Image (tube, helix red, strand yellow):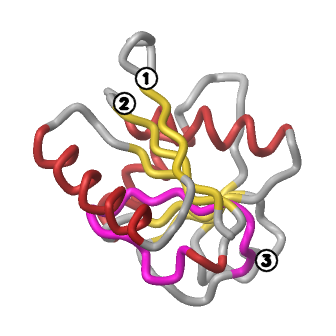
Amino acid sequence: MTRIDFYFNVDHKFRQVADLATLALTRQRRLFVFTPDTAVTEQLEEALWTNTPISFLPHCRATHRLASETPLVIDWSEAPLSHDDVLVNLRPEHPPFFSRFRNLIEIVSPEPEDREAARKRFRFYRDRGYEIRSHDIAGDRTR
C-alpha cells in the first residue's frame, strides 16, 4: 500500500521539493513531481536550476527521451510514467494514479485555500484506509 506523507505549513513549496529531491537522490530514490500545469512545471524547473550554486538536481519532463533514466521527473501530464517510486503532488486534487507509487508526498502551504484542498485530499486517502503521516514545517521558517 502507498505510504502517504503530508508536509504542512510549507512557505516555499519549490524549496521543499528541492530538499525532498536532494534527500531522495542521496538515497537513490526516484521522484515524479506532479504539477498543476505547464507554467508551474516551468517555474519549478527554473527554481531547481537556481536551487544553490553548488548543487544540481538532474530532472526532465515525462515525455523526454531520458525520463526513464532521470531520477527527477517534473510534469503536469499523467503519461507516460517512467517509475513508481515517489510521487510528489503539487495539485489541489489527489492524483488519480497515486496508488501505483510506493510513496506519495503532499506539500501544503499555510494559505487557507491550499489547506482546505489538502484537508479534502487527506480525508480522501484516510477514508480509503491509507495510513497518513503528518509533518508540520511551521517551526522551520527557512523552508
Which residue is rendered at x = 86% and y = 42% of the image?
A: 27
Spatial CA distance of label 3 from label 2 is: 29 Å
Which residue is rendered at x = 74% and y = 35% of the image?
A: 23
Disc 3 target residue:
68
Residue 18 sits above or below residue 66 on the image: above
Which residue is rendered at x = 74% and y = 76% of the image?
A: 83
Amino acid carrying label 1: it is Ile
Q: Residue furthest bottom?
A: 80
SS state under label 3: loop
Amino acid carrying label 3: it is Ser
Locate residue 77, reporting x and y percent.
45, 81
Work out whether residue 15 or residue 129 is closer to the camera in this orientation and state it.
Answer: 129
Spatial CA distance of label 1 from label 2 is: 6 Å
Which residue is rendered at x = 64% and y = 23% of the image?
A: 53
Q: Is residue 18 magenta?
A: no
Quadrant for the C terminus, please.
top left
Disc 2 target residue:
10
Q: Is residue 95 magenta?
A: yes
Residue 57 sits above or below residue 36 on the image: above
Nearest to viewer (mark 3 / mark 2): 2
SS state under label 1: loop
Amino acid carrying label 2: it is Val
Residue 143 sits above or below residue 109 on the image: above
Disc 1 target residue:
137
Locate residue 40, reporting x and y percent.
33, 58
Magenta residue span = 82-98
